[in-house]
Amino acid sequence: MICRGARGGAWHPRKSSHTPPQEVNGCVSYFLHEAVAKLKNGFGDGDTKPSRLLQQGWHELTRCINISAVIHYQHLMDVREWFFRLGLQYLVAGRFSACAGVSPVGANLLHHALEMLLKGYLSSSMTLGELKKIGHRLIKLWDLYKANVGDASLNQHDGVVTELDKFEEIRYPDKIVSSGMFVGYSFVRGELVTAGPGRREPVYKLLVAEIDELARTIFESASINVSAIDYLSEDSKTYLTKWNESGLLKN
């Protein structure tokens, strides 16, 4: 068994750094309550003046607001990081499956890889709930990503996204049983994937080199260093780099 931590050590459930609302409210309320009480009942020379108590309450409130802002930012960064980490792991698993000729699961895994990477990028501007509602609709995610990046050159990847999205049709066996399938993987540009004469099954084809290039593009647009986002074993590196000319690990 290999046990690995979320941040490099053993697996530990990370404690939430959120300050409980009751503690925040309690601290602020204390200063405000004391200030009001002294205004009503009077105060002696040695007592803390109401203005000072109000100032302390204000400082406590702004401190809590700043802490909440930091916690929210850290939460967003954690979500984003994990989307990219999962995307990278799916990419390794998908490329391994494609190398082994496992179909259609290899393509399904690559579909999940791009889905996670796109959601990782979009998580900076969308909530987890919004991303979950999109589900596995890769073309929808791709359109949102392109709109966010605003680079017309991304249109060159439309074809591979469309082809990969077709594999969602055969993630469950019902359509395979009713219509059949012909799946072809290619790692080298120029190799044609055909079903051959007389075959009537739906053709699902995938050029893995285009997936590699698209993955690299998404990592670069998010300024994510592939080598730093997750620990990669030598076996993982082997299947991530095999027949991969995109330079993904040089990111």
Image: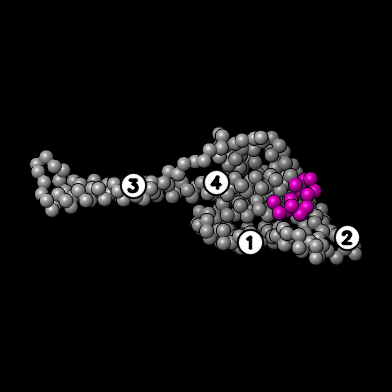
Q: Amino acid under label 3? A: Glu
Q: Amino acid under label 2? A: Gly
Q: CA distance from mark 4 to mark 2?
A: 43 Å
Task: Point out the frontmost of discs 4 and 3.
Answer: 3
Residue 86 in view, yes or no: yes
Name the foreground residue: 187 vs 123. Answer: 123
Q: CA distance from mark 2 to mark 1?
A: 30 Å
Q: Residue at x 65, y 51 (%)?
A: 113
How would you rate the neighbour count of disc 4 (Cα within 10 Å): few for under 14, some for 14-19, many for 20 or more? Answer: some
Name the foreground residue: 97 vs 157. Answer: 97
Picture quadrant where residue 99 is located: top right
How would you rate the neighbour count of disc 1 (Cα within 10 Å): few for under 14, some for 14-19, many for 20 or more? Answer: few
Magenta segment:
97-109
Whichever of callouts 1 and 4 sits on the residue coming sooner in the sequence is: 4
Q: Is residue 221 magenta?
A: no
Q: Are marks 4 and 2 in contact (CB under 8 Å)?
A: no
Name the foreground residue: 182 vs 237. Answer: 182
Whichever of callouts 2 and 1 sits on the residue coming sooner in the sequence is: 1
- Looking at the image, residue 188 sits to the left or right of residue 56; the answer is right
Q: Residue at x 63, y 55 (%)?
A: 115
Q: Is residue 105 magenta?
A: yes
Query: Which residue is the site of mark 3?
Result: 23
How would you rate the neighbour count of disc 2 (Cα within 10 Å): few for under 14, some for 14-19, many for 20 or more? Answer: few
Q: Amino acid under label 1? A: Arg
Image quarter where the N terminus lies is top right
Q: CA distance from mark 2 to mark 3?
A: 69 Å
- Looking at the image, residue 216 sits to the left or right of residue 177; the answer is left
Query: Which residue is the site of mark 1?
Result: 137
Q: CA distance from mark 1 to mark 4?
A: 21 Å
